[in-house]
Amino acid sequence: MGERMHRIPLCSILVISSVSACDRQIEETVAVAVPSEVVELRDSPSVEELSRETQVIVLGTGTPIPDPRRAGPGIAVIHKGEAYLFDVGAGVVQNATIARYRYEIPSLSPTQICCVFLTHLHNDHTQDFSELATTMWWRRQRKLRAWGPSGLTDLARGVQQMLAPDLAIRLSGNQPIQQPEGYRIETTEIEPGIVFEKNDLTVEAFEVSHGAVAPAFGFRIVTDDKTVVISGDTTYSEAVLEKARGVDVLIHEVISDSGLLRNSMGFQAYHRGSHTLASDLARLATEAKPKILVLYHGLLYGVPESVLVDEVAAGYTGATVLANDFDVF
């Protein structure tokens, strides 16, 4: 049925999107109309899915500060009919569901998402971890697999404890349960290096500097047709620079130089040791030379988005995008 720009029927999915360009901002209500929600039961990717090029879907671009236009951090890499998520901030699972219909990507249905990689365990990057693992767990055909820093196993154990009342009700009642073990999470606590390989896809973790958070990781994803680096939360990092040289897509967090100065001295010191200033990111990108620099997790503190983009552009002349939720690369 396509996209409509007017009042939507009950069975449609409502998306609030924005387009930012310099000082211009357009708010628009977009409905992705579908006959009804569907339970995704495919056993394997279709031939058509297997033939698609690798896609990077931005599912969330936000920060710990609640934002009506941005979900928490989350990036999906779609390759050969599988969805690989990198962080799952608040709202990422809902955005994955919207993107599934918007872009016709069955692997983004929550019960079909196979794998999640966590950069670190700050809650703004993990708030939808429980939602991803437990959404319709009785219809999940494979356990969710998760990779992340030490502490991940405890996080997964907490999800299981939270789910205990639901398990008791469903498993003792008359509801058909297709996968009684579907709620379980298979966790791997990682060290720097190759953490996942499947056919022509490789995920490499590397350590970054995120203040007192240790370890914290960035990820380099290599497929047969695309190379992507995701910085995670970090200050200026030589590790990011080395992994990002010549990549197709560099997705990097950023804090506005001028926005930083609106904070207390305590928070200025904290952010300088935890996040990457726009001016420092420009310096990194100038040396790394990615084909495109994608800004996300942008800490602005009241500064217009155009100012943040200008701060990067003052020191970097390459292609740069301040990402919005649902952008595709």
Image (cartoon, rainbow, N blue to C red):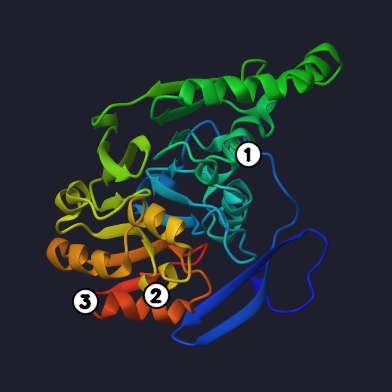
Q: Is residue 193 above or below residue 329?
A: above
Which residue has dot 3 on it? 315
Instruction: Inspect the image, locate mark 1, and give the three-letter code of the amino acid beneath it.
Output: Glu
**Which residue sits at x=62%, y=25%?**
159
Residue 316 numbered tag: none
Which residue lies at the image location 49% right of the left edge and 52% below the top edge? 73
Q: Secondary structure at mark 1?
A: loop
Pick the quarter of the image with the C terminus: bottom left
- In the rendered structure, which disc, 1 or 2, sits on the residue that comes first in sequence? 1
State left or right for residue 33 relative to residue 117. right
Mark 3 and mark 1 lie on one chain; the one further toward the N terminus is 1
> Looking at the image, can residue 38 be seen?
yes
**Mark 3–mark 1 contact, CB under 8 Å?**
no
Report which residue position mark 2 lands on: 258
| Earlier residue among tags 3 and 2 | 2
Which mark lies nearer to you, 3 or 1?
3
- Give the x, y percent position of residue 32: 66, 65
Label drawn at residue 40: 1
